[in-house]
Image (cartoon, rainbow, N blue to C red):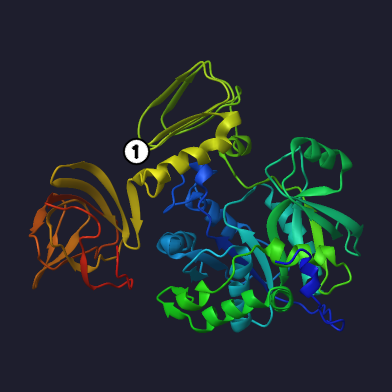
Amino acid sequence: MPDDPAENCHFPSDQTNTYMKHTLIPVILSGGSGTRLWPLSRQQYPKQLLPLVNRYSLLQETVRRLDGLEDIAVQSSIIVSNEEYRFVIAEQLRVLGKIGKIILEPYGRNTAPALTIAALAAMQDSDDPVLLVMPSDHVITDISVFQAIIHKGMTLAESGMLVTFGITPNAPETGYGYIQYGTALHEPGTFRIARFVEKPDLATAQNYLEEGSYLWNSGMFMMRASIWLTAIDTCRRDILEACRAAWQSGSIDGDFYRIDKTAFAACPSDSIDYAVMETLSARPDMLPPGAIIPLSAGWSDIGAWDALWRTLQKDESGNVVRGDVLLHACHDTLAFSEHRLVACIGVENVVIVETSDAVLVAHQDKTQEVKHIVDILKQRNRPEIRSHRKIYRPWGWYDSVDRGERFQVKRIVVNPGAALSLQMHHHRAEHWIVVRGTAQVTRADKTFLVSENESTFIPLGTPHRLENPGRVPLEMIEVQSGSYLGEDDIVRFEDKYGRKEN
């Protein structure tokens, strides 16, 4: 980017604003890793896929956020993600009874390319809809206020404006960027953007809070698809050209659309703010104009454990607990337990998070520094940074219960109607014991059923497949034995999910 990014941006002066009614498509960006919420959030299962606030994941809550929205025709969401999360996202949509277009990026290129890809998809399927761009890992507790603000944003977006939403600050927060709003627009409670500012120091943040015209940058946007494509074409044509080539050369893969890997590799990485929005605020004479709407709806980006503690309901001592937790004489503490009893005595302002393979203990004031632990895990190539013991697959999940020299024990759950690939292993044999449901087993040239309390054996080197023909989840115990038990010891012959690996 040049020092003055507005130098290369010249929107045509005859850009027209139309007030026709458009449909609304939610665009959900789901590529982040959320490492500050380790050990619950992992590279292969990040925070947006976790049920941190209630029984729904943050992604599911984002999808549900427009349910019941009146007087606006809302179409199915477009979700831009990477391959790691594709099957979990599809399953979480299925659980909600929702249909969405899931677009897979082969590489992370930040939010501007992700929105550009989504806009191209939206223009292909609809007549220039309004896009509501939302990160998948935010929390909004007051849905009625949020939906009322969406109505205001819809009016501005239909008129041809690029709209962002600024969170009304309640503290001098140094972890967010800020947006200063300027002159008021015709729609009550809406303003022109005066300027964007980076994350400030504490004194500057306090000045922003006292001045009153600065809002936290939420990362949420609203605009017509054609308006975004015009803006990115004028400001960052290199991004648009790379995205258009990647979109046009992409392919449908079952429930997903894969953009072309080679074409997308040439796409620069940039954010929506840097690529377009800051340029508009620097040149108020340019079209399309940028607008900002203040939002006070219980918003949080759950950037760290202390932010989650502030969001969740507390007991009379300020504690938040989940799972099998006992507290005595504790105050302002967050304690999560996934697998065993966690007992805390006399602790204050502490975060304790227990998972099957890791335990985090941190002072509330130091939770941002979890990233340093994550960096150490990366340097040491520890598996705890990548995945949980419980691994999700398109057919269900498995949990590695125990492991020793030449053996491994897994608990496997296969969803109704789902099937593992027809596969073979070079270095291990497998014993299967069904504890719930009925398994349909293919072993070499034979297919047979295995019911509860029955078992079967898969010899090393034998082609085999496991299926669930029933209406309830199939649960079984698998005991692997052999000289090598890695997940890469697999040869696939057939796979209904189009996988070549895992």
Which residue appears at 80% of the width and 67% of the height? 280
> Which quarter of the rendering shows the N terminus?
bottom right
Q: Is residue 16 above or below residue 372?
A: below
Residue 110 position, x and y percent, is 59, 62
Q: Which residue is mark 1?
A: 357
In the figure, is residue 292 to the left or right of 331?
Answer: right
In the figure, is residue 201 to the left or right of 259?
Answer: right
Answer whether residue 372 is visible to the viewer in this image: yes
Residue 381 position, x and y percent, is 36, 46
Which residue appears at 87% of the width and 44% of the height? 212
Which residue appears at 43% of the width and 73% of the height? 255
> Which quarter of the rendering shows the C terminus?
bottom left
Amino acid type, label 1: Asp
Q: Is residue 494 above or below residue 49?
A: below
In the figure, is residue 268 to the left or right of 83?
Answer: right
Q: Quadrant of residue 207?
A: top right
Which residue appears at 85% of the width and 55% of the height? 181
Instruction: Return the residue nearer the eye: 480 or 205.
Output: 205
Instruction: Return the residue nearer the eye: 453 or 169.
Output: 169
Q: Secondary structure at mark 1?
A: loop
Q: Quadrant of residue 132?
A: bottom right
